[in-house]
Image: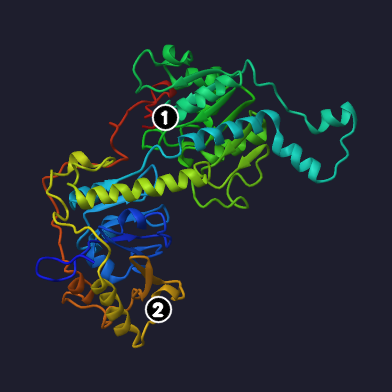
Amino acid sequence: MSRNVNGSLPCRPLVALLDGRDCAVEMPILKDVATVAFCDAQSTQEIHDRVLGEAVAALLWDSITLSREDLMKFKALKLIVRIGNDTDNVDVRAASELGIAVCNVPGYDVDEVADSTLSLILNMYRRTLWLAKAFAEERQIIGPEATREVAQGCSRIRGDTLGIVGLGRIGMAVALRAKAFGFNVMFYDPYLPDGVDKALNIGRSVTLQDLLFHADCVTLHCPLTHHNQHMINDYTIKQMRPGAFVINVSRGGLIDENALATALKDGRIRGAALDVFEIEPHNPLTGPLKDAPNLICTPHCSWYSESSCRELREMAAQEIRRGITGRIPDDLKNCVNRDCLPARMPLFPSAPIGSLGAASLAGFHTLADSINGVNMGNPAFMPYTPGFLSAMVGQSPVSIPAPLPTMLESPVVTNRPSSVATSMGMKQMHLAAQSNVPQHSTNSSTPKSNCSTVQDAVLSAET
């Protein structure tokens, strides 16, 4: 193990996985430049004070929300990487004002989402799911009459028009796949330059209303903003071709679920397939969609495959590594609030390379022992207890009980540098709000619109 010039063991910045407990993919990328802690928390109240005080970077999925108040609890945080496409669960404006860079991980799931979209479309047209259910119920399907009865509603794809709202990377991948199945493809995306339709040999609608009027099947591939929330509503459904299909694997808020349920029951919409919902996790036994016919619901999993999940986690960890070893935000690849942050020096100019020092592990043991009053034993075989922080030091997890919200006078809470910080040589870095930083939010990047008609609706394509 390498030592510093003064003979001390090298220090490591602390990186926290806030709402997960599996670091197997991230560790090979980060272990030589950081100590990684996984908290498995659903709110910042469940995160240990040591992480709140010392974490300089954080990874998070979508099961924890970071509001302004939550962000202010972190005393050293410089970088947040959302493991996914969007940053809806992070107050990006507040992070910008606090000098915290926020990154996402786009592009990892293009093939999976496009394939899932076509799968749902095929289920709508060929009614595969309903046929499988009928067959599983041991219904006798013998002869043309029985086949006609059970397969009623099956349609031919070739010659129908697929309307794509938002021709970003996923929308374009859907378009190319749909053409192979025989669809006439058209799209609506006011942000794309002229000529895209000719390059792809597909149609282009200049208004959303025009696309809805001509499409036999409408699929949504745009992010959710203040301007396109409930884009598919009672009014726009009436602009659609009677008997059209609706597919949504993008964002649940794009569709008014009450209006969709009514249209499905009335038969104006022949079928719908949803992978995203206004309220998630979605409960199929409650809400306006519970009794809607001809509806397929999947649990927001169109992005997932083993390959895409691993690629997503690797890309997120690599972004963290760039932040630790480089400059923030200059060296970050997908910083969504880059324009609101000043150019900076490296987060840790002399981040050491090599395996994690034994002093770090000893520091965690000291803290854990002081809390529990017992010898923790071999950390590699430590049983996991819900509500505990598990700190990954090298490859060995060490459990540290997270303080309850009411334990304000706990001896664990102290104003002195913690044993973790002392052993790792880390400094507490307090952030001051930057009053001159421009206001920024991913939800307000598009100018507000006073449009009152469907054709004036403003959408932004996935990037």
**What element does badge 2 sit on?**
loop
Q: Could you say which is closer to the camera, residue 171 or residue 72?
A: 171
On screen, residue 433 versus residue 392, left or right, reads: left
Residue positioned 56% across, 39% down in the render: 274
Q: Work out whether residue 91 can be spotted.
A: no
Q: Which residue is mark 1?
A: 169
Q: Is residue 104 above or below residue 463?
A: below
Mark 1–mark 2 CB contact (< 8 Å): no
Categorize mark 1 by other alpha carbons within 10 Å: few (<14), some (14-19), many (20+). some
Q: Could you say which is closer to the camera, residue 96 or residue 419?
A: 419
Q: Position of residue 60 (x, y in %)?
A: 36, 54
Query: CA separation, marks 1 and 2?
Result: 48 Å
Please state which amino acid type lies under the numbered disc 1: Arg
Q: Position of residue 95 (x, y in %)?
A: 23, 51
Please state which amino acid type lies under the numbered disc 2: Asn
Q: Could you say which is closer to the camera, residue 27 or residue 146?
A: 27
In the displayed image of the protein, which residue is found farthest to the front? 1
Q: Which residue is mark 2?
A: 378
Q: Position of residue 217 (x, y in %)?
A: 58, 25
Q: Is residue 239 above or below residue 386?
A: above
Q: Check the picture and name the quadrant holding the N terminus.
A: bottom left
Residue positioned 41% across, 28% down in the render: 168
